[in-house]
Image (cartoon, rainbow, N blue to C red):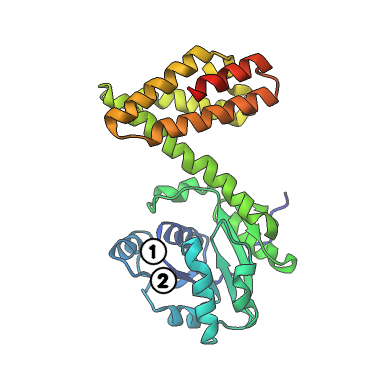
Amino acid sequence: MNSPIRPARLKIGLISAGKVGAVLGAALRSAGHTIAGLHAVSEASRTRADALLPGVPVLTVPEIIEQSEVILLAVPDDALPGLVTGIAQIDGWRSGQILIHTSGRHGTNVLAPATAQGAIGLAIHPAMTFTGLSLDLARLNSTSFGVTGPAPFLPIAQALAVEMGGEPVIIAEGDRPLYHAALAHGANHLVTVTGQALQILSSIGIENPARYIEPLLRASLDNALASGENALTGPVVRGDAHTVAAHAQTLANYALEEGAEDIPTAYLALAKATAQRAYTRGALTQEQYHSVLSALAG
């Protein structure tokens, strides 16, 4: 795509110096923008701000709004509507001010109380998980940013994403919940499944389970990204129903011994989903498919 026009240098205020806000603030500062101030309540946020944004003053929310041309709202999804509405109720938003949130779930409708007072609302969501450390800045390079907003102002969101090292991708307002669900399903549940596998390997005496399983997991992810579900291997897609049944029973026993009921629950649900998708694309015959489902049913 054509690179968006580089925006003028802006005075940006950060409401929340959490993991996302502090890192994006540091990226924008590196791009030449001025960080006018930040709002940080917890000790962890203040420590993070000191590390990533040294010299930036900690201000109240009204002070940040007063001193900034752009407000970056990096607050949790569920907190965003109440924050925007609360400030609007005291006529806190300024006409012409650019208001950007980083929520994946929300588009710009959530900013309606502010845009009704003349603010410009945009959504910029990096498809990346954050640690709140400086290493996140390098990870922003080539990260996709889901951007949403009114057509006349989308170039601002696109340009800021590019300046942070990312690749802007326009997401329609109505698609934001589905977009975010896809990211959460893929990334968050990957962490859960990995944690479960590490727990099991540790319980059988493998001293460094992460190191043991790392090559397998990295290869699986790389293959999946390159080839989609054609990269799938294992007993389910082979129709090895007896192995699937053994896995299900073994994990059920493990759950009773270790109090880890979440593990067989996840295995059964994901194995069933895998079988359904393998059957739909013709990787399993009908007989194999029903054999696997029967094995999972116990």
Residue drawn where x is 63% and y is 70% of the image: 121
Above or below: residue 72 compared with residue 224: below
For disc 1, the marked residue is: 53
Instruction: Mark 2 vs mark 1: give the one in front.
Output: 2
Which corner quadrant of the image does residue 150 belong to? bottom right
Left/right of residue 260 with respect to residue 283 in the rendered view: left
- Secondary structure, mark 2, is strand
| Label disc, if present, on residue 83 of the rendered structure | none
Nearest the viewer among 274 and 37 is 274
Give how far apart the Cα atoms at labels 2 and 1 are.
Answer: 9 Å
Residue drawn where x is 63% and y is 50% of the image: 178
Q: Is residue 218 visible?
A: yes
For disc 2, the marked residue is: 38
Residue 248: x, y in percent? 44, 23
Q: Residues within 10 Å of mark 1 (few under 14, many from 20)?
A: many
Q: Is residue 208 visible?
A: no
The amino acid type, in three-letter code, at marker 2 is Leu
